[in-house]
Amino acid sequence: MSTDTTVTSDKTRQIEHAFTYHPPKPGQPEKYTQLREKAKELALLIAELTPASREQSVALTELETAVFWANAAIARHGQ
């Protein structure tokens, strides 16, 4: 059984876009700050209300991941 490893032009464009530096446009840094501030509020609430545990660590890691992807959406799609 052979596997097709041809990379389509659409996939190449997606990869190029994902791995290209996107310098901030006016207004974007403020959005990053808003997201981080709100996420920090939630992270502190999670730390306050939940016992130190694997589950707490996962919750905080996933929140950090959510902020990362939200920032990437802003950077990559110019809002």
Image (tube, rainbow, N blue to C red):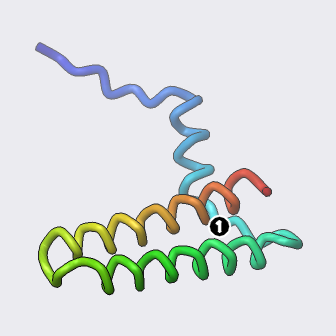
- Figure disc tally: 1
Choose top left, top right, bottom left or bottom right for residue 3: top left
Q: Between residues 74 and 46, which one lies in front from this camera angle?
A: 46
Question: With 66 as the anchor, is 56 left or right in this view?
Answer: left
Q: The disc labelled 1 sits on which kind of residue?
A: Tyr
Choose top left, top right, bottom left or bottom right for residue 50: bottom left
Q: Where in the figure is residue 51, as x and y percent of width and height?
A: 17, 81
Question: With 29 as the anchor, is 9 left or right in this view?
Answer: left
Residue found 52% across the figure and 67% down from its top: 67
Q: Between residues 75 and 53, which one lies in front from this camera angle?
A: 53
Please tell me how crowded label 1 is: few (under 14), some (14-19), or many (20+) other residues with Cα within 10 Å. few
Q: Is residue 53 above or below residue 71?
A: below
Q: Where in the figure is residue 78, as x and y percent of width and height?
A: 78, 56
Question: With 21 as the anchor, is 67 left or right in this view?
Answer: left
Residue found 51% across the figure and 81% down from its top: 41
Q: Where in the figure is residue 55, as x and y percent of width and height?
A: 17, 68
Residue found 61% across the figure and 65% down from its top: 71
Residue found 60% across the figure and 81% down from its top: 37
Q: Where in the figure is residue 69, as x and y percent of width and height?
A: 52, 59
Residue of label 1: 21
Q: At numbered mark 1, what does the secondary structure look like: helix, strand or loop?
A: loop
Q: Is residue 3 above or below residue 60?
A: above
Choose top left, top right, bottom left or bottom right for residue 30: bottom right
> In which quadrant will I find the N terminus?
top left
